[in-house]
Amino acid sequence: MNRNATVGLDGPIVRSVMQRALELATHGPATGVNPQVGCVILNATGDTLAEGWHRGAGSRHAEVDALSQLAPGAAHGSTAVVTLEPCNHVGRTGPCSLALIEAGVARVVYSVTDPGEQSCGGAKQLRAAGIEVQDGLLTEEGEALLGDWLVAARLGRPFVTLKWASSLDGRAAAADGSSRWITGPDARLDVHRRRAACDTILVGTGTVLTDDPALTARDADGGLLARQPVPVVVGRREVPTSAALLNHPQQPLFFDGLDLPGLLANLHQRGLRSVFIEGGPTVASAFVAAGLVDEYLIYLAPTLIGGPGLALGDIGVASIGEQRRLSVQSLDRLGDDIRVVARPLTT
């Protein structure tokens, strides 16, 4: 088959195969420096030749994983359906665009354009080699899959989730500073599951000194979940050697907190793409004021506390016209509590 010819596949077939590629991508790790990517290789009549997905940093990328299952020359004239634009750089592995060219693939269909400064450009390289390229198929689904990785790649910093639990009157602690427990067991278990889904968990030294948190992700019986976020502590006060977080399975990281964008850039350079903030109002307010929160995770308990223990302090809003509007993504009931997921409203 002429490489410049269009592979004879109709729209519904390709869409269905892209959905399969998205499913394959979920087999890979949802955290870490690399994205979840799936790939399906088809022959000219739409039959599946091979499937692949990326299994984590240092392993074969999805396209190469799929191609590796084929005999030499078997991919000639085929179509590669992949969830992310094939990369065009040499890292721990070679560029996927080159692998597709060398395999004789005739057509590449992908969902999401790679925003990485170093890894982008694969589509251009493929077209220059005479390969037909179609982009933007099921983009909404593709971007939803990539989630925090996509934000981190576009912004050059981790995706930041700010979590707090409060009473209906907005208090996260009583007047004496105590805060255990405002919400019920269902909400607390949900928090631990979400901790495990993030690369890092961040608190201020005030929270460490007041609550002595372990900062681990645990199951309903108190046992450690298989995956644990890296503890990040922000502040200039000294953490005592007896602090529970020092026994965390992951090595804690410490920052003075004077440069929050620099802190996030440091985490990004370490390959940490998501941050789960569970600090007190000082840390929470600082990130909100700096415009560095991508998602708000708020648990509301049906109780009233009153007093000064607000979940947020000064966030730089001096008048009602400066309020920070949010878009509610979901609203769910967990036992007696309400979970609100919201993101900054973009205009």
Image (cartoon, rainbow, N blue to C red):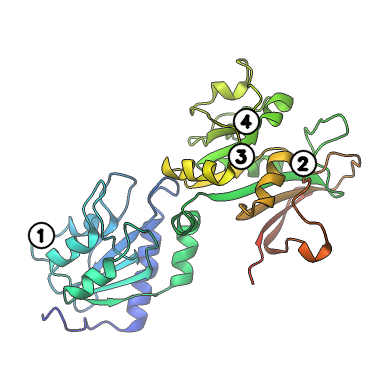
Judged left or right of residue 167, residue 104 is left
Query: Can you give x and y, in whole percent of width and height, for residue 139 in the image?
Result: 44, 71
Q: Which mark is residue 71?
A: 1
Q: Mark 3: which amino acid? A: His
Kindly report the distance in space between the C-alpha atoms of the residues bearing marks 2 and 3: 13 Å
Q: Going 11% across and 81% down the picture, which residue do you hit?
A: 2
Q: Mark 1: which amino acid? A: Ala
Kindly report the distance in space between the C-alpha atoms of the residues bearing marks 4 and 2: 17 Å
Residue 115 lies in quadrant = bottom left
Residue for badge 3: 192
Residue for badge 4: 221
Q: Nearer the viewer, residue 311 or 141?
A: 311
Q: Nearer the viewer, residue 231 or 107?
A: 231
Kindly report the distance in space between the C-alpha atoms of the residues bearing marks 2 and 1: 57 Å
Q: Report the mark closest to the observer, 4 or 3.
A: 3
Q: Which mark is residue 277?
A: none
| Residue 240 versus residue 195 in the image, above or below | above
Mark 3 burial class by Cα count in 10 Å: few <14, some 14-19, many 20+: some
Q: Earlier in the sequence, mark 2 or mark 3?
A: 2
The quadrant in which the N terminus is found is bottom left
Q: Earlier in the sequence, mark 4 or mark 2?
A: 2
Q: Earlier in the sequence, mark 2 or mark 1?
A: 1
Q: Report the mark closest to the observer, 4 or 1.
A: 1
Q: Earlier in the sequence, mark 4 or mark 3?
A: 3
Label 2 element class: loop
Q: Which mark is residue 183?
A: 2
The quadrant in which the C terminus is found is bottom right
Q: Mark 2: which amino acid? A: Thr
**Residue 47 in view of the camera:** no
